[in-house]
Structures are given as structure tokens and as C-alpha cells.
Image (cartoon, grey):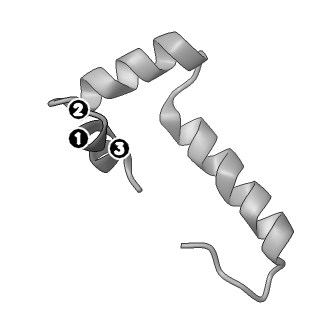
Amino acid sequence: MNVESAAFTVGYESPSQFSREYVRMFGAPPKRDVSRMKTVLMQRQGPEMPVM
């Protein structure tokens, strides 16, 4: 899921506003957490299963 989809899913009308609020709450942009999640999934699944 990208930032725009996440923003609309949780009720924001603007992805940029969602990103600003995310940074205020978590101290970093959503992209940081997406990267971390992908890394964790790759470690759990192994290289033979690609992460989407």
C-alpha cells in the first residue's frame, strides 16, 4: 500500500497532510516504516520469495 492509499483509507483527503501528521506522531515519514517492514519480510521469507 502506498501513502496515498493509506491516507484515503484512514480518512484523509490529502496524502501530504497524512504524511505530515504521520511524522508528528512517529517522528519519521511513512516511507521509513515501509522500508523497515519490507526488510523484515525479506528476512522472514528468504530470498526465494519476492516482496510486493
**Depicted 51 relative to depicted 17: above or below:** below
Q: Is residue 19 left or right of residue 45?
A: left
Q: In the rendering, at what x and y percent does residue 32 appear?
A: 60, 37
CB-based contact (under 8 Å), mark 2 and mark 1? yes
Residue at 29% in and 37% down: 7
Which mark sits nearer the N-terminus, 3 or 2? 3
Along the line of sight, which residue is nearer the eye, 45 or 28?
45
Q: Secondary structure at mark 2?
A: loop
CB-based contact (under 8 Å), mark 1 and mark 3? yes
Residue at 38% in and 26% down: 19
**Depicted 43 relative to depicted 6: above or below:** below
Residue at 78% in and 89% down: 48
Q: Residues within 10 Å of mark 1 (few under 14, many from 20)?
A: few
Q: In the rendering, at what x and y percent does residue 35 appear?
A: 63, 49
Q: Which residue is mark 2?
A: 11
Q: Which residue is mark 3?
A: 6
Q: Type of residue at label 3?
A: Ala
